[in-house]
Amino acid sequence: MALETSLEQPAPVRTIANALSGWIDRLGAVWVEGQVTQVTRRPTMQTVFMTLRDSAADISVSVTCPRHVYDALNPPLVEGASVVVHAKPNYYVNRGQISLAAREIRMVGLGELLARLERRRQILAAEGLFAPELKRRLPFLPRRVGLVTAANSAAERDVLENARRRWPAVTFEVVHATMQGTRSAAEVIAAVQKLDAHPEVDVIVVARGGGSVEDLLPFSDEGLVRAVHAIHTPLVSAIGHEPDQPLLDLVADVRASTPTDAAKRVVPDFAEERAGVDAARDRLRRSVTHVVGREQQLLDQLRSRPAMADPRTMLDARLDEVSMLRDRARRQLSHRLDRAADEIDHQRARARALSPLATLRRGYAVVQDATGQVLTSVAAAPEGTVLQVRVADGRVHVVSTGTERTGTERTDSPDQPDPNQTEPNKSKDA
């Protein structure tokens, strides 16, 4: 219902604001298409604020979205995405602003395409096709480089020229394939499999220049991703420019930002490697020179020592020491021999003093009967007894012609010796 107002009876602001709120509220929920130009998401708030702009005119409107609706989007909503929003218009009376309360958000156009690619990426990632541990290292100097690219393309020239500029002896095995359109994915798969079967190809490069998301769509083909995952040769992906990232970049062993960067990654720089070899040779030469100089200095120090300057010095000192030890040994041995000789003479004199021969030499004799018993009494040598007289230089055989006792005392026993006898028995020769 229209408000009746006049110059004399104007309506207050609150009346107009409430009327606008009622009219807009009766509009109901609508589907709105536009481009997201601004997203404000605060962690502590359950509402996300966005600005939706018309793609053809310079007109924009504020949009509020519950946080759970915003978080459910896959892939996440970013600024610049084209969307279709199911929302109900609201008029905030206190601020006099109109906004759309979003109930559902869907990607359209490029946004829908990116959403499908994101879902495909998540599925393949869950299968482990993009795992970092599956990435293979590129060979330092490949025997032959396989190149998959469009015929007579700028990407082909960039890879070949930059690689040969870095390493002139590099050789390529080039397989041309369509890099855009519906046949592109199948031809790239066939080219990659052909190079993987080549016995001399050590690394494969898939190169293409920049383009739109639709132009690079074949390099996010699921069949191509699985084919690259199945090959045994390391693969370098050089698709588009730095911001572009098709799924081939994720499954490849190395991602190059441009075809020129791919050429730098597959072969080393000859000048840099030669400079490195020269630097290593110089370091080795300096190290060897240092070691030789140090050893020469050590030899000079050894040669300057007195023992090395005149080796006979040590021999003379040792010779004097040996002579001194020899003289000492001789003196010790002579001293011990003299003491031993004196001891022998002493023991010999003692033995001679105790020997019966010494007594015999003084004129004494030992009388024995025929059995060898020593006579100690005249009773044991009656007349006619054969006796032996032992003197210092032999024996005298005699026969007793009689006996004579000395002294006045006699014993009853003929065998009892005469205690007063001081001279040996005198006998007569037979």
Image (cartoon, rainbow, N blue to C red):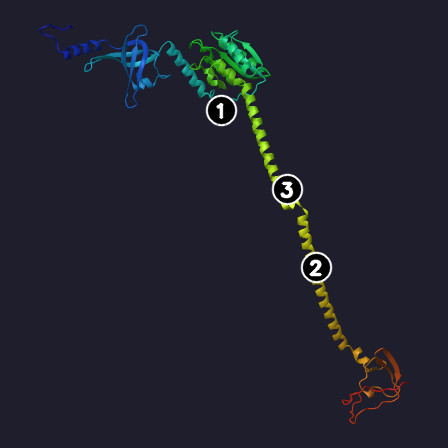
Instruction: Please state which of residues 319 and 5 is positioned toward the viewer in this rendering.
Output: 319
Crowding around mark 2 (Cα neighbors within 10 Å: few <14, some 14 to 19, many 20+) is few
**Sooner in the amino-acid sequence: mark 3 or mark 2:** 3
Q: In this rendering, is residue 312 above or below 109? A: below
**Sooner in the amino-acid sequence: mark 1 or mark 3:** 1
Amino acid identity at mark 1: Glu
Secondary structure under tag 3 reads helix
* Residue 259 position within the rendered picture, expressed as x and y whole percent measured from the top left: 49, 13
Mark toward the viewer: 3 or 2: 3
Q: Tell me how far mark 1 sits from mark 2, CA to CA.
A: 85 Å
Q: Tell me how far mark 1 sits from mark 3, CA to CA.
A: 61 Å
The answer to whether residue 232 of the structure is visible from this angle is no
**Sooner in the amino-acid sequence: mark 1 or mark 2:** 1
The tag on residue 303 is: 3
Q: Which residue is mark 1?
A: 133
Identify the residue at the far right of this view. 430
Amino acid identity at mark 3: Arg
Q: Tell me how far mark 3 sits from mark 2, CA to CA.
A: 35 Å
Q: Which residue is mark 2?
A: 327
Instruction: Please state which of residues 20 and 164 is positioned toward the viewer in this rendering.
Output: 164
* Residue 19 position within the rendered picture, expressed as x and y whole percent measured from the top left: 17, 10
Amino acid identity at mark 2: Asp
Mark toward the viewer: 1 or 3: 3
Q: In this rendering, is residue 289 above or below 98? A: below
